[in-house]
Image: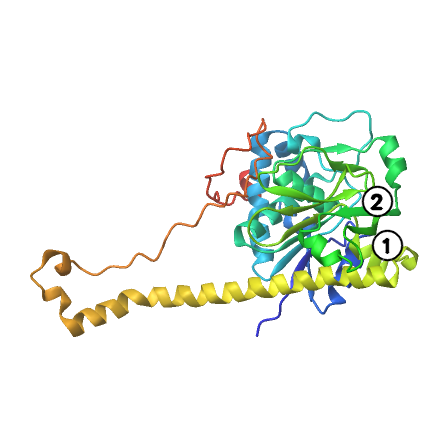
Amino acid sequence: MLEITVAVTDSPEVGSLSAPSLKKSFASVNFPVVDADFRVMMRDIPQEVFKEAYKTPEGRKKLFLHAKYMANEILDKVDCLALSGNVAMIDPSLFNQPPDNSHTYNFDYSRTIAELALIHVATQRGMPIMGVCGGYEAIAVYYDSTLRSLTPAELDQQGYMAYDKIIFETQSILGQLFKSKNLATVERNFFGAHKQIIDELNRSYLKVTGRASDGKLTEAIEGNYGAPLIGMQFHPEVTLHGVYPDSSYMGEESEKKVCLELFRFFLKAAQAYSNKKSVNEALKKTIATLPEVIHQEDNKTNINKSEVSYVNAEATVQHNTPSKTLLNNPAIFWQGKRRTHSESDQKQCHPVVLASTL
């Protein structure tokens, strides 16, 4: 049996306070981890070439196509994608908003393009996806939602690098995983360290499943279709293992048990995805042999010697059917205007555009 693995976005060139704890959390449920190194994904493109291409929608599209090629290389070998948190913000131009000059931001353009490509490819494959903090925001942007900065009052309300109450929808996946037998509502304390939040959510593809203690700000989202897609503004991995290398931020034992259920859920989802891949591969092999099998059966029964015209036709089987179009696959961040949510994405994957063509 093939080993079930999860790809976690991380790069030793950048470092992370979130990724080490996220990896340990998967390891806590015996879920092996491989790195999805976003720097390696974009390394073939010289920095100056990247900067120039990023300035225009067409250039960003080419960068994205290159990143998709690299994402396929990574996700070929895994069964789940986990997008870790980071200190960088997401460039407002990627969700078609003007720059916010009231704040000084640290953008990681290359990482964002790489993570959007990973989300795109994982979605097309029907792979389970987890997003934490910055990864959660990348999921929102991929699905045509917008972000904004927290106001000073909102930061005071929730705190920064602090625990706060999250209120979950009882019928959501997270609500079911985090529920308590003694409570009608699902409320848990989680660690938060973010200054950017979802502003407008594209509800055609995503739904709110968790809110902050004020009952207003979005803290968790889930996909409306397909494989499990869960984004969390908070940090369940910190509850389990603290903020690397400081373990003082870990949660209480009762909260740790709840968080382990989340990572076990993704392990089971990855196992289901792996089984689906195996079945699909077996079906492809079977379908590939059908023309020869039918030909052999024709010879046995002499069906093609019949004088009836519709029976006399040569037996054929069409097995290269077009790939289905996914409804939850916008990936329109490179365009110059926001698309209405009623539009569907009918575009097929474009050929990869390598660095030499940028």
Q: Which mark is residue 184?
A: none
Name the quadrant containing residue 27.
Answer: bottom right
Q: In this image, 163 relative to 201: left or right?
A: right
Q: Amino acid at mark 1?
A: Val
**Where residue 255 sits: x, y (%)?**
83, 59
Identify the image quadrant of the N terminus: bottom right
- Rendered-image quadrant of the C terminus: top right
Residue 241 versus residue 62: which sits nearer the camera?
241
Look at the picture and state if 324 lies above or below 307: above
The residue under label 2 is which amino acid type?
Ala
Residue at the image position 62 percent from the left and 61 percent from the top: 269
Above or below, 118 relative to 276? above
Q: Is residue 42 visible?
A: no
Disc 2 crowd rating (10 Å Cα; few below 14, some 14-19, many 20+) is: many
Residue at (58% x, 30% y) in the render: 57
* Circles 1 and 2: CB atoms closer than 8 Å: yes
On residue 193, the disc is 2
